[in-house]
Image (tube, rainbow, N blue to C red):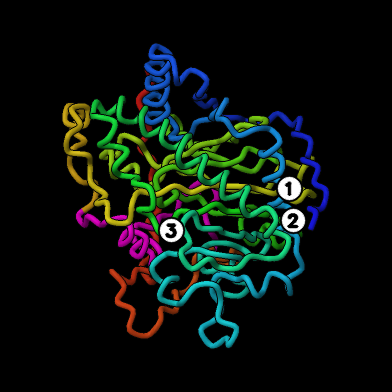
Amino acid sequence: MSLPPYTPATPTDEPLDYVKLVNIDLAKFDDPVGRQELARDLYEAATGYGFLTLTNHGISDEVYRRQMQISNAMMTLPPEEKAPYEGIQALSSPAGGLITPEEDARGLYVGYKPAGPLGHKGGFPKQLDHYNILVHDPKNRPHPEIMRPYLEETQEVMSFIRNNILKKLLSLMAMVLEVPDEVVQATHAPGGSKTEYIRYMMCEPRPKEESEKYRDIFLSGHTDWGSWTFLFSQPISALQVLDHQDGVYRWVQHQPNGLVINFGEALERLTGGLFKATIHRVVQPPESQRHLRRIGVIYFARPADDVELRPLESSPLLKRLGRDKPMDDRVFCMADYLDARKHGWKRYEYDIDRPMDTAKHSDFFAGEYPDPEGHKSLGKFDNVAREIYVPVLKAAN
């Protein structure tokens, strides 16, 4: 089955306030001097925005374009063709889903976002849809027919990101932390994470009234739960990052055929806060692109399930900086951390420049997850009011 044609949008020429990100050029990695330079660049990104761009990553332009084309095909299937491949459906539904309620409660994401309230509960309004494919799927879950001829290639892309790009970044991280390479690599042992996945994603244009209901935000300000997020850059401007120099959200500029990388909460905890989890969001595109469908491809890397999210004890740098103590009063392993976060632990209101008026705005995270009977969550935090995030601004140089 052939893929429908897909033509990327033309980048906007509107004068947006772009953030200036560090770029990691992996062409330098094999040269010892270049690798030292890259480690310094990574440190700058870690202590700056927690966002960076990646070029010369090794994914060919052809494969890059086809992944975007696959995402477009998967996201634009009619609802009746998506329905059998939803990750989880309502507990009362006889259709079931690709994962069990117990797997869902533990933070496993597979298949399409549920079409009903279960899908919206995670902070995703109805105009945003996604489809997840696990890196390690012992159940060999089925995929829509249009995906099947391209599944092997997608698995090769996931393998390349994990076994080549991620390994290089972990090596640079080891250099920054002044620890042996194997110490950092062990945190992401191959096959150690049951929840690592690639995501195809779509944001549909929406009516003005609907957009205003969500404060012109498609995906509320948040930090990712894992370690590294790899986003295939695409030309419709909508991604913003919170700048801790002045507390202002700024746009992330398109990097043709590049990857946009951000750090997640697990990485932040493994480094005692040195690699700060990036606060970012997806908003209404600029006027010239507002009518366009936004297609995305994202890979979410995570530490192995049993890795405790505490600072690496052997790092001299973390000790010198006073970042060798756990950030939280509760230390979870990665698998348990997903459970806690899914149930609302450490959830903040990050859209500080667009305060919610309960009289006219809808809450992205309203309600509670309907856990299966007998599931012993690590804590139910859904009914706890979200704390308003107050950015700690960095001192000017």
- Name which residue lies at 57% across and 53% down: 199
- Using residue 349 as the reference point, say whether residue 114 is left or right of it: right
Residues packed near mark 3 inside 10 Å, few (<14), some (14 to 19) or many (20 plus): many
Q: Amino acid at mark 1?
A: Gln
Any magenta on residue 341? yes
Are the residues tagged 3 and 2 within 8 Å (C-beta)? no
- Name which residue lies at 39% across and 60% down: 386
Q: Earlier in the sequence, mark 3 or mark 1?
A: 1
Q: Amino acid at mark 2?
A: Ala
- Name which residue lies at 50% across and 72% down: 99
- Image height check: is 275 above or below 158? above
Q: Position of residue 342 (x, y in %)?
A: 40, 64
- Image height check: is 114 above or below 277? below
Specify the quadrant of the image occupied by residue 381. bottom left
Are the residues tagged 1 and 2 within 8 Å (C-beta)? yes
Query: What is the secondary structure assignment of the residue under circle 1?
Result: helix
What residue does disc 2 label? 73
- Pick out the residue farthest to the top: 33
Q: Amino acid at mark 3?
A: Thr
Separation of disc 3 and disc 1 at Cα? 24 Å
- Image height check: is 70 above or below 55? below
Any magenta on residue 345? yes
Q: Which mark is residue 195?
A: 3
Q: Which residues are magenta?
A: 329-357
What residue does disc 1 label? 69
- Name which residue lies at 77% across and 68% down: 78
Query: What is the secondary structure assignment of the residue under circle 2?
Result: helix
